[in-house]
Image (cartoon, grey):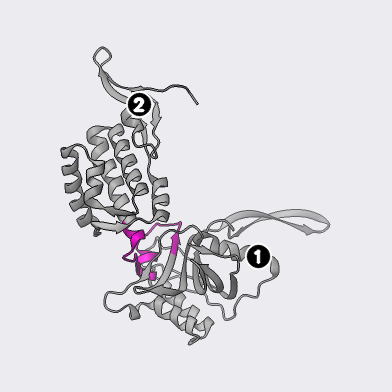
C-alpha cells in the first residue's frame, strides 16, 4: 500500500496512556524525541513496515458530520500547521484514554509521529502515525560492576511487530483522507477501529471484493461443508477463486451461473447471502471491479484441506478448480461401513 524508501520522521513524541476504567493516569511528555542515529534507523522501518502490505484502507466516519471526528480534526490541524505538534499529540492521547471503558483495555506507550516522504501509489505525501505499544518483552541486560559482569532482566519494546497503529495520509478521495490501520492485539474489536479512530471501509473495489469473497468463504464453511462434505466445499472455493482471477469485473448473476451447477446449492447460497448481509450489515454488490491486491490476500485465507477422523488430510489446490471433480471420488464402503476418497494420479511428485 505504501513505500518508505524516501520516508523520514519530522517529529515524534512518546506519551503513556492509562486506563479510565481502572483510574490509572496518563503521563505526558513535554518535548519531542531527539533520536540518535542508531535508534532512528531501527525505529523508522519498525513504524512503517506494518503498512507496506496492507491491502485495505479506511476513511474517517461520524454519525452526523465527519468534521466532528476527533482524530480527523487533530490530523488536519497538524497537516495544515494550525496546531502545536506537542499540544495536539496530548489531545490525541486524551481522546485515546477516554475510550478505555473496560478493564481489558491495556495501558501502554503511545508514539505519535509526523512523517514526510511517504510514497502512496505514484506520489509522495506526509502522514501522521499513531502507535500504541501494549506488550513489552523481557530481555537480559549485562553490565559491569566491580570489575565483574552481572546481568538483570529488563522489559522493552520488541522491534518486530506493532501492537496497534494507524497511518493517516495527507491525501484522500471523495470519501475523505486515506487511513491505514493494524491491530495485532484485537482483544476488543470496537476499541481501536470504532471508538478511537472511528473509521470505516470506503465504498470501493477493495471492499466489494473482500465482502464477496468473505461471503463465499463463510457459505462454504457453514453450509456446504457440513451438508455436502469437504470436497464440495473445496470445489466451490476453487471455482470462486478461478472466477475472480479470470474476470476483471464480477457480475454476481454470471458468477452464480459459472459456479453453481446444482439448483439446490444455488438456492442455499441465495438464502445464505440474504441472512449474511443482514447479520453483518454489509451489501454485496451485484457488479463491481475486482481488486487483485485484495484477491491475493483473501486467497491466502482460504483453506481447502479435507480433514478426516482417521488422521489423514487431503489438501486440494485452490488454483485448480477442476482437479477435485476430475481426480477425486467420494464413496461409501458397505463392508467397512465407512466413507472413502479415491484419488487418481499418474506419478508422485
* Vertical side of 283 occupied by 227: above or below: above
Q: Which residue is drawn at 51% across and 60% down?
A: 52
Q: Residue at x 22, y 35 (%)?
A: 227
- The percent position of residue 30, horizontal first and vertical second, equals 57, 81
* Vertical side of 278 occupied by 309: above or below: above
Does the magenta segment cover residue 185?
A: yes
Rendered image quadrant of residue 331: top left
Rendered image quadrant of residue 143: bottom right
- Which residue is at the far bottom? 82
In the drawing, does residue 237 fall left or right of residue 90? left
Q: What stretch is highlighted in magenta?
A: 181-208
Rendered image quadrant of residue 117: bottom right
Q: Can residue 5 be seen in this view?
A: yes
Does the magenta segment cover residue 311?
A: no
- Mark 2 nearby-residue class (10 Å; few <14, some 14–19, many ≥20): few
On residue 41, the disc is: 1
On residue 327, the disc is: 2
Closest to the observer, 42 or 303: 303
Closest to the observer, 348 or 269: 348
Q: Judging from the image, what secondary structure is the residue with disc 2 in?
A: helix
- The percent position of residue 162, horizontal first and vertical second, equals 51, 60
Q: Can residue 284 be seen in this view?
A: no
On residue 152, the disc is: none
2 or 1: tag closer to the N-terminus: 1
- The percent position of residue 40, horizontal first and vertical second, equals 65, 68
- Which residue is at the far right? 147
Does the CB distance between marks 2 and 1 fall below 8 Å?
Answer: no
- Mark 1 nearby-residue class (10 Å; few <14, some 14–19, many ≥20): few
Q: Judging from the image, what secondary structure is the residue with disc 1 in?
A: helix
* Vertical side of 40 occupied by 304: above or below: above
* Vertical side of 50 occupied by 83: above or below: below
- The percent position of residue 93, horizontal first and vertical second, equals 46, 75
Amino acid at each position: 500500500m505504501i513505500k518508505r524508501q524516501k520516508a523520514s520522521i519530522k517529529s515524534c513524541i512518546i506519551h503513556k496512556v492509562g486506563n479510565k476504567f481502572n483510574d490509572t493516569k496518563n503521563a505526558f511528555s513535554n518535548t519531542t524525541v531527539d533520536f540518535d542515529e542508531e535508534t532512528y534507523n531501527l525505529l523508522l522501518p519498525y513504524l512503517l513496515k506494518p503498512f507496506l502490505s496492507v491491502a485495505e484502507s479506511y476513511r474517517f466516519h461520524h454519525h452526523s458530520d465527519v468534521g466532528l471526528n476527533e482524530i480527523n480534526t487533530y490530523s488536519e490541524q497538524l497537516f495544515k500547521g494550525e496546531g502545536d505538534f506537542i499540544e495536539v499529540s496530548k489531545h490525541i492521547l486524551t481522546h485515546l484514554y477516554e475510550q478505555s471503558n473496560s478493564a481489558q483495555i491495556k495501558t501502554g506507550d503511545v508514539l505519535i509521529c509526523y512523517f514526510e516522504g511517504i510514497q502512496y501509489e505514484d506520489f509522495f505525501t506526509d502522514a501522521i502515525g499513531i502507535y500504541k505499544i501494549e506488550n513489552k518483552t523481557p530481555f537480559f541486560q549485562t553490565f559491569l560492576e566491580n570489575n565483574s559482569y552481572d546481568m538483570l532482566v529488563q522489559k522493552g519494546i520488541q522491534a518486530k511487530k506493532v501492537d496497534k497503529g494507524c497511518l493517516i495520509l495527507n491525501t484522500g478521495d471523495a470519501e475523505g483522507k486515506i487511513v491505514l490501520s493494524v491491530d495485532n492485539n484485537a482483544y476488543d474489536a470496537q476499541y481501536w477501529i470504532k471508538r478511537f479512530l472511528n473509521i470505516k471501509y470506503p465504498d470501493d473495489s477493495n471492499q466489494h471484493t473482500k465482502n464477496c469473497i468473505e461471503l463465499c468463504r463463510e457459505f462454504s464453511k457453514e453450509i456446504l461443508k457440513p451438508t455436502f462434505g469437504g470436497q464440495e466445499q473445496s470445489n466451490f472455493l476453487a471455482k470462486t477463486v478461478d472466477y475472480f482471477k479470470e474476470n476483471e469485473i464480477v457480475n454476481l448473476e454470471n458468477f452464480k451461473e459459472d459456479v453453481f451447477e446444482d439448483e439446490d446449492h444455488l438456492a442455499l447460497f441465495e438464502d445464505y447471502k440474504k441472512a449474511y448481509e443482514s447479520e453483518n450489515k454489509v451489501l454485496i454488490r451485484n457488479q463491481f471491479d475486482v481488486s487483485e491486491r485484495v484477491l491475493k490476500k483473501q486467497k491466502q485465507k482460504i483453506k481447502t484441506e479435507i480433514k478426516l477422523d482417521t488422521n489423514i488430510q487431503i489438501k486440494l489446490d485452490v488454483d485448480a478448480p477442476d482437479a477435485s471433480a476430475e481426480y477425486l471420488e467420494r464413496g461409501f464402503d458397505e463392508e467397512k461401513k465407512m466413507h472413502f476418497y479415491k484419488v487418481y494420479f499418474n506419478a508422485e511428485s
